[in-house]
Amino acid sequence: MQNHLVIIGAVWPEPNSTAAGSRMLQLITLFQKQNYSITFLSSAGKSDYSFDLESQNIKIHSIQLNDSSFDELITNLNPDIVLFDRFMMEEQYGWRIAENCPNTLRILDTEDLHFLRKARETAFKQKKELLFEDYISDVFKRELAAIYRCDLSLIVSEFEMQLLTETFKVDSSILYYLPFLVAPISEETINVLPDFKQRNHFISIGNFLHEPNWQTVLQLKKVWKSIKKELPEAELHVYGAYVSEKAKQLHNEKEGFIIKGRAENVADVFTNAKVLLAPIPYGAGLKGKLLESMQFGLPNVTTPMGAEAMHGNQDWNGFITNTDEDFITKAITLYKDENRWSQAQQNGVGLLQQRFDKKLFENDFINNIALLQTDLKVHRNKNFIGQIFQHQTLQSTKFMSRWIELKNKNN
């Protein structure tokens, strides 16, 4: 009998707009390869850029927040596994799954640790070092509670695995390290792409709705004049979905600082550019743009925050810099030095092969899922903190949701 996976999405996936959208499609592909039937649910509105899930034989349903119609739907679907896309979805629907489908395996895909990103943003904006107490926000409490309530949480970053298990003592049995999953790549694949001499200009890319991406653009504006002075022919093309008005105001043809907006074809943009610039000041998880730069043979210059948990002890596909001055110098070096550039490109292939090739993770992950399904009661009994959170949250969230539903009907 075919296994059934239900995914509850915070949004309808947009793989050409966000790394989170690409990640979701990677997970869908992984489960479909194991012959799972998949149903995708979301209360969000669709955009023109939402991926056509039905073209991949995925059933879809629009759902409502705080509405008991979900109970009937999920009971009828009767999934073997429910995957929550980020902790907010677990908060909204987790108690309904627990009540209507108690034997369903509940998995949380964190995407990145929201509390970590929030803490780093606070420290960055207050121009101070990150302190332990910065972690302990409302977002931290909500996210950790969701992790405990689920049977398994997927973590994309080794740094975040370490933070959860060592700093916050979360039992590793309810966590699973599953980074970006990419198709195998070889140097031959890269060699057919445009070479150093055929490529021009710098690029930056990132969805403008994501605050760290906007801060990255502001960092670029700060360093660009110094790079341009040394490389007068070069331009910086800034790509990203959902360009804001404040971003458009940074556009300056004379300075060669060009706000391009949405990249209609990321492959074309990446394979024709010479260097990707990503002076990422804060964030969490893994950076999709840096992974894609490796896939398209595009060396990059970034920060320790950008490269976090991506390279282990391997050489980076470009440079990781700590200061604005070093960033400027390394950007110019990478743009001018063909040998450095070629070596950086090869490093990227090595990183993809050693750290992100989906073959390294798929079988182990699926085996882990099968084991949990066989032994779910024992697994849950060991996670007694999760049982406590489940009990408390089930009551509080349930009655709050029922109250909102009643209020909506009365209105």
Image: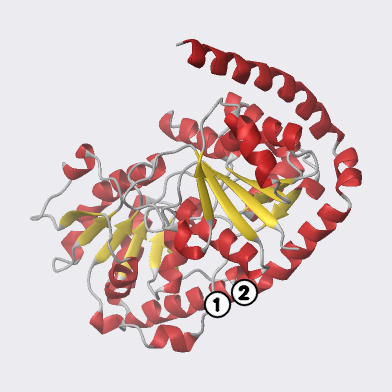
Quadrant assignment, res 136: top right
- Is residue 279 placed above or below 232 in the rendered structure? above
Left or right side of 21 for 139: right
Cα distance between the residues tagged 2 and 1 = 6 Å
Q: Residues within 10 Å of mark 1 (few under 14, many from 20)?
A: many
| Residue nearer the viewer, 136 or 387 | 387
* Amino acid type, callout 1: Gly
Q: Name the residue under label 1.
A: 350
Mark carried by residue 354: 2
If the image is split into quadrants, where does the C terminus sit? top left
If the image is split into quadrants, where does the N terminus sit? bottom right
Residue at 82% x, 31% y is: 387
Residue 143 seen in the current view: no
Residue 410 in percent (x, y) is at 49, 10
Asked whether the beta carbons under mark 2 and mark 1 sit within 8 Å of each other, the answer is yes
Residue at 57% x, 60% y is: 28
Residue at 60% x, 45% y is: 110
Image colouring: secondary structure
Residue at 26% x, 65% y is: 202
* Amino acid type, callout 2: Gln
Say what secondary structure mark 1 lies in.
Answer: helix
Say what secondary structure mark 2 lies in.
Answer: helix
Left or right side of 316 for 357: right
| Residue nearer the viewer, 138 or 36 | 36
Left or right side of 123 for 110: right
Mark carried by residue 70: none
